[in-house]
Image (cartoon, grey):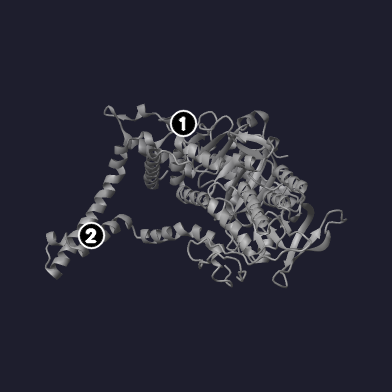
Amino acid sequence: MASLTSTTAAAVARPARRRSLTVRASATSVKLSGRPLKVAVVGGGPAGGAAAETLAKGGVETILIERKLDNCKPCGGAIPLCMIDEFSLPLDLIDRRVTKMKMISPSNVAVDIGRTLGPDEYIGMVRREVLDDYLRSRAKAAGAEVVNGLFLKFDAPQERNGPYRIHYNHYDGVKGERGERRTIEVDAVVGADGANSRVAKEMGAGDYEYAIAFQERVRIPEEKMEYYRERAEMYVGDDVSPDFYGWVFPKCDHVAVGTGTVTHKADIKKFQAATRLRARDKIEGGKIIRVEAHPIPEHPRPKRVSDRVTLVGDAAGYVTKCSGEGIYFAAKSGRMCAEAIVEGSANGTRLIDESDLRKYLEKFDKMYWPTYKVLDVLQKVFYRSNAAREAFVEMCADEYVQKMTFDSYLYKRVVPGNPLDDIRLAVNTIGSLVRASALTREMKKITL
Amino acid sequence: MATFAQIPSSLSFSTKPLTKSSLFLIPKRPTLLSFHPIKSGITTSTSTVSPSLDQKLEVNVATHEAKLEVPKRFNDPRWVKGTWDLDQFVKNGRTDWDAVIDAEARRRKWLEEYPEATDTDQMVFFDTSIIPWWAWIKRFHLPEAERLNGRAAMIGFFMTYFVDSLTGVGIVDQTSNFFCKTLLFISVFGVLFVRNNEDIENLKKIIQETTYYDKQWQATWQDDSSPDSKK
């Protein structure tokens, strides 16, 4: 999009075809005189908070616009260990440490995974309002300006190096609900405003397919809560969801029972009822204290950068398939985007352009593409039908599978194991799938 | 506050919007809610049940509850403590694996039709891999293999005859010919992959599926070459 008038040694621009991650050298950036680069981060969730903090630390003048500072975003709330390390999160942010997970197949075959976890390994469950607030306060401490406001639209720059003019409703210290309409001028915009991103709409990023995640928070009696103290459950089956899973996740003092779907959104209530039925004995006597739903993107938007506007987190569509994990990738993409901006602007002294933002996209895609692809393949293979789900749960009983699953989830790395183990795993997987589909063919012949 | 009823699907509430971003339900009395799926997390959907509908709905709830009581939990004398008791499947002094396969198929069918609550006291842990590999092969693979081999043989015989009548090349000479070997390759794989009419469509869909996700990720790089294209 940015035209090339390169006077510096430029990298060769290959035409972008099938699998190209092209990098173009930026044009000689304009040196900003007398002021640092100014960037607006729209949205104050994990992506926005992480981006704002890194930008502010790098010497960029940052303004973070968040519409609801006490927002309790409906969310599973699970974060991997690597996020705690990489973002130096204090451990008191974590309400619960899940060390046991139960996978339950359509025919209620239950498998416990977590035997391979070490004593210090767990899945952290957080409350989004607590996590988001913490990241925002860190951004503020680093020098970012946190504003309570609702982003409305932006005006594209009039000339090539001109500013973006952002229109928003300012709520801070303003009486009344509507707030006060204000405008600010910034050099770049980072859209971190989630699945229904307005920034994405403004920049013409295109649409994505999305799942609806529906969740009920249930306060259950103390003795039943003991069962869920360190345990999360995952239910798979056509009754619970045709393309996702139902879950029971423990929160601080209650459990969240929910399910999701992409293809059958109108039946979500039916799926929720089925999830409650499967967990019935364990949540009996519970009171529903909250019902919430939210869209979850299924894949990245067609366009994630346009001139000096880019997207991070859910707004960009960085949610994995199969597990639906988004918090870590949101925060990481926010940080990577901010790092690219800081680098491209030489710590806020030069204006950036689209190629700097494309560097962030390239880095993110390269680092996490294998993770996304593997989870996509797993979803396609194992969430296909009840037979595949039975095979999936059967495979989860294998220790090697558990170790690899947790390694790749907790640390976002795949440690290459013994090739013999891999072959054995492949043989067992095929065996499970074949047995399950053979049973399904038998099932078709039966009439109850 | 409504507590969790035995029949969760008849649980219902009237709603009151609290904030602009979340749906908060305050259950008042047992009435059926007609729920519209929430389109986005930001807007709320509200529906209130008018008092005049209550009486009608109470009756519906009662009959609905009655209907749901009918399917019993899965019950089989050979299903003991979350697994199949193999001692009960003995025939002629040996375990009748075919019967185990039949029993498990029936159990899965039952649970697919009438999903059940998981039992905390007794977890199901039956694993199909306890049924030995040869039982699976004998039951499922062999009939299918016979069918496919039969097809391959018929195709093979007639193709050989046809090629012989056209070119005069006999069966022994055909096997060393590259073109004939290609035809053989195509026939064998055709028979393996296209077993039913639906398979042709399924194969096309699978090929498209494997690269679809990749295309979605590459989309942001495509506009390098086509600046005015917008998906």
Q: Is residue A47 left or right of residue B171?
A: right
Return the x and y of residue A317 as percentages of the image width and height: 60, 56
Rendered view: A146 above or below B87: below
From the viewer's perspective, tell me whether residue A79 is left or right of residue A184.
left
Nearest to the observer: residue B87 or residue A409: A409
Q: Quadrant of the N terminus of chain A?
A: bottom right
Numbered mark located on residue B184 in the image:
2
Residue drawn at the location 68% of the way across and 52% of the way down: A51
Report the disc number at residue A448. Answer: none
> Between marks 2 and 1, how big is the CA–CA gap?
49 Å
The quadrant holding residue A122 is: top right
| SS state under label 2 | helix
Question: Can residue A379 be seen in the rendering of this structure?
Answer: yes
Residue farthest front in this picture: A8
**Image x and y of residue B229, in percent:** 57, 71
Specify few, some or many for label 2: CA neighbours under 10 Å numbering under 14, 14-19, or 20 or more: some
Instruction: Tell me which numbered mark, 2 or 1, is placed earlier along the sequence.
Output: 1
What residue is shown at x 58% (from left), y 42% (from top)? A247
Residue matched to label 1: B82
Q: Quadrant of the C terminus of chain A?
A: top left
Q: Secondary structure at mark 1?
A: loop
Q: In front: A362, or A152?
A: A362
Q: Left or right: where does residue A392 sit relative to residue B147?
A: right
Q: Chain of mark 2?
A: B
* Residue that appears at 63% across and 29% down: A226
Left or right? Give the position of A3 relative to B195.
right
A302, B124: nearer the viewer: A302
Image position of A25 with respect to A448: above or below:
below
Instruction: For mark 1, name the chain.
Output: B
Residue type at numbered disc 2: Leu
